[in-house]
Amino acid sequence: MALGLLACLSACSLAVTGYNQAPSLLIFTWVNPHLDLNSEQDKQLRADLQVLHLWHRQQQLPVYAEVLQKMVALAPQDMTGTQICSLVDEFKDTLTPLSQQLSPAMARLALKLTSAQLQRLEQQYDKDNKDYRKEWKFDASAAEQLEVQTDKGIENAERLYGRLDGKQKALVKQLAKESQFDLGKSWGERLRRQQDTLSTLERIAKSQQGFVAAQQESLALLNRNLLNSPDESYRTYAEKRQAITCEAAAQLHHTTSVSQREAAVKTLKTYASDMRSLAKAAAS
């Protein structure tokens, strides 16, 4: 649930219309399919998300715009993996205050969840997991799984640079092969987060411990799922993967043409402009 909220409030910010409608979109596309809210829950969550949305618009979009502007300045030249990871870390730094702001809404909802809703959430997780396994071709060969990873890498790169040439696509495949991506570890952490979420929400709903305690539990859950996994081996893996991915991005960027870098600058400027425009709308 926390990751769904984050995705809608952050990823949707790349489209002005989507961002402006983020609270309603989130309830329609994720919360209701997974929890089937009653009218009272729906009304409260919409109110809470409007407050969160305004805070996010005022406090976090300017940060996104600032980081994107740094990317604009770097894009015309070669970059190092260290520079890219530094920018990634600036985005990640926004997760701590986001978790703090999100925890009250999560606590109020958790206190009102029924056993039937928690059961529905578990069932929807199972459905999501089947889709995830199909998307990543869990039951296919390592070569086929590598193709999925490569296709996703190419898609992300072309969203920034425009079309890649044959040599660049081959490089993406080689970088994917060397990325040390461990589908099993990602799957294990996915299941841990889901089980942690289910057990925490069930504990809050059944204990009726009061709002303050529920908020503390909600914040701890968000921190475990967004910031700091309790699985030490996964934390080590994730840190290593980030460093490898940043180096890979730098290698690909080194091969880009002047026109591809100009396309990247244009795209990043558009994103930054959108962030600033959306943030200013909060004051109007």
Image (cartoon, rainbow, N blue to C red):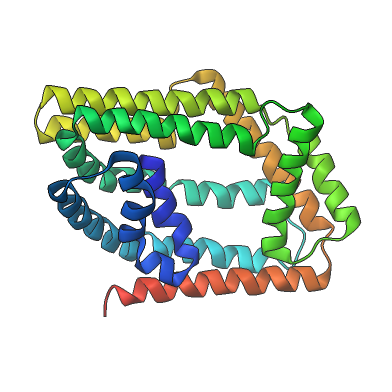
Is any atom of residue 231 visible in this view?
yes
Query: For residue 144, which quarter of the picture?
Result: top right
Q: In this view, does 113 lie above or below 169?
A: above
28 is higher (above) or lower (below) than 82: below
Residue at 80% from the left image edge and 41% from the top image edge: 175
How many labels were placed on the picture?
0
Q: Where is residue 41 in the image (x, y as percent from the top left)?
A: 17, 46
Q: Where is 233 relative to 43, above or below?
A: above
- Of the 4 image quadrants, the one containing the C terminus is bottom left
Would you say residue 97 is visible in this rendering?
A: no
Q: Where is residue 212 in the image (x, y as percent from the top left)?
A: 12, 34
Task: Judge whether 237 appears above or below 16 on screen.
Answer: above
Locate residue 130 relative to residue 102 in the image: left or right: right
The residue that appears at 29% across and 72% down in the rendered structure is 282
Q: In which quarter of the image is residue 16?
A: bottom left
Q: For this view, does 132 lie left or right of residue 13?
A: right
Q: Residue furthest bottom?
A: 284
Q: Where is residue 82 in the image (x, y as percent from the top left)?
A: 67, 46
Residue name at image x 32 percent, y 43 percent: 99
**Residue closer to the observer: 145 or 100:** 145
State the image coordinates of residue 231 (x, y, percent, origin top left): 48, 20
Depth order, front residue of 142/217: 142
